[in-house]
Amino acid sequence: MDPFDSADSLEGPSRSAATDTEVPEPWSRFSAWLECVCVVTFDLELGQAIELIYPYDVRLTEKEKTSICYLSFPDSYSGCLGDTQFSFRLRQSVGRSSSWFGQEDAYNKDAPVALQKEHAHFHGYVYFRQVKDASVKRGYFQKSLVVVSRLPFVNLFHSLLQVIAPEYFEKLEPCLETVCNEIDQWPAPVPGQTLNLPVMGVVMQVRIPSKVETPGGSPVKQPQTENLLPAPTVLPSVHELDLFKCFQSVLIHVQMLWELMLLGEPVVVMAPSPTVSSETVLALVSSITPLRYCGDYRPYFTIHDSEFKEYTTRTQAPPNVILGVTNPFFIKTFQCWPHIIRLGDLKMSGDLPKQVKLKKLAKLKSLDTKTGIYTAYKTFLHKDKALIKRLLKGIQKKRPSEAQSAILRRHLLEQTQSFILPLESYLESLMPPQRSVSPWKTPPQIRSFSQDEFMKTLEQAGPQLTLKGDWTGLYRRFFRSPNFDGWYRLRHREMTQKVERLHLEAICAADLLTWTKDKSEVEIVDLILKLREKLMRARKHQLPVKEELLERSEKSIQTIISSLPEDLQTVLHRQ
């Protein structure tokens, strides 16, 4: 084997994507999108149970199967009759090996952080049907069709379920097998490309954003290369919810909710149904885009959840998590939590949605607790009254919900970007100057992040928005949050890779043969081994170094090896 070929790409399970000349592994294309599709039913003796699962050999632990069963049915308090759609997120079992983890995942490399595949959690997308049925002992037909994936594509997968679930409930198993075989023919999810996804006579056309695109910008239009019949159903987004619909009863508190998400505060959303619960939690998480929410979040959480005890213990402070719940039992359980959003069915006050009020936590006592945001939190920034005025005026003028959502999303995006920009500028100043990168020395160090030093930069490079308030206090609180920790780790890793790339480019451009003329054999062998390691790491992490530079370095190594005694050449060629 060529010593410069990375062995890592050859490791791992056999479900990896095949090359053009190979026949794809069974379910390899399917598993690029989904982990599995399952049907959950209500068994009189067992309760919720998995009736059917595709692929048959999917590797789910018993704990994961049990969690999927409980999370796929609304609890009895929701009273969901007819068809209901919602989503959940569950923790993967410890020690479980994934079908793709361990390989360099090309999708995650190009996807925005908020849309990357998850290593430790599954997303579940549910289509639940409950209708009266005299032929069933309990008098009701109750089934859920569930799509399980590592991808947070809530809009795409709910649209997929709207196509396949009604048909499945009529025709059952053979229909589901056909659907899974169709998904196994889909192209891979590639950020930045428009993809046509055929299923059951419908073609869904989607575009996954790429991390190089400007968030909130217009997507680049792809040329139409074929006349598709039937004409595709174009989904405007794979992941974006109707933000305005999700927030319409809390519009006047959007600023506070944004701060709670930014700071990773523990929040419970108590909702009348799993649909409202899951959509509200996902909308909250997306409100700080392009920043990744680094705490845990559960769009729908039940008392049967495997983390129930962990998240409801009173022996320690509430964890950094957002929980969406529908069972009134949780009102008593979560009395010690600092922020509780109690939502009811939407009520109108004239043309306007009735806004929930801020209330003291002490009033959260009984099962019939009224709607409201129960918190003692004081915002660092003032409300943007112009935004609220614009949205309320839009309601009166009957502006479409999509347009209202676009206004709200743009506002939240600009606010988050304004908050992050000074941090990004400060990080740039921590990078070593390019002129300090020498091929003959170890790579220079990135300076440490100093909170006090950063605070001093705010006078000249503070947030550019007109929003007034205590920005300094907000940054100091942010530094203690999991979101800062996650953001800094990611950016520091990217900066380290940039320094490594610059160092490797300097080595590739250097005259290594001349350098070795007056060096001992030990020093030369040490150089060869270190350079080989650098080249392998560059390929493994896919550092953006030009291929011709890497090839030039490889040739230099071979030339240097050929100048050494034969016994050393033999040893080095074997490695």
Image: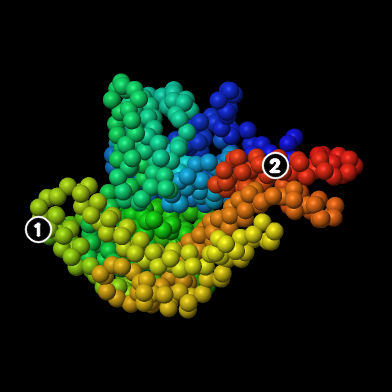
User: Dot 1 corresponds to which residue?
Assistant: 350
Going by the numbered disc 1, the residue's amino acid type is Gly
Q: Which residue is mark 2?
A: 554
Quarter holding the C terminus is: top right
In the rendered view of the protein, which quadrant contains the N terminus?
Answer: top right
Examine the image and state in which quarter residue 325 appears. Answer: bottom left
In-front residue for pair 391/314: 391
**Residue at figure coordinates x 76%, y 41% from the top left:** 559
Q: Position of residue 301 (x, y in %)?
A: 42, 54
Q: Secondary structure at mark 1?
A: loop
In the rendered structure, the answer to whether residue 206 lies left or right of residue 123 reads left
Q: Is the C-beta separation of discs 1 and 2 under 8 Å?
A: no
Q: Quadrant of residue 267?
A: bottom left
Q: Residues within 10 Å of mark 2 (few under 14, many from 20)?
A: some
143 or 436: nearer the viewer: 436
State the residue at coordinates (17%, 58%).
Answer: 391
x and y, in percent, of residue 102 in the image: 62, 44
In the foreground, 135 or 505: 505
Q: Earlier in the sequence, mark 1 or mark 2?
A: 1
Amino acid identity at mark 2? Glu
Q: Is residue 243 visible?
A: yes
Q: Gap between marks 1 and 2, in whole Å? A: 74 Å
Question: Is 356 left or right of 98, judged from the image as shown?
Answer: left
Q: Is residue 166 left or right of residue 88?
A: left
Residue found farthest to the right? 567
**Tag nearer the camera, 1 or 2:** 2
Give me the residue at 23% from left, 61% from top. Answer: 251
Q: Secondary structure at mark 2?
A: helix
Q: Position of residue 368 (x, y in %)?
A: 28, 64
Q: Residue at point 20% right, 62% down?
A: 387
2 on left or right of 430: right
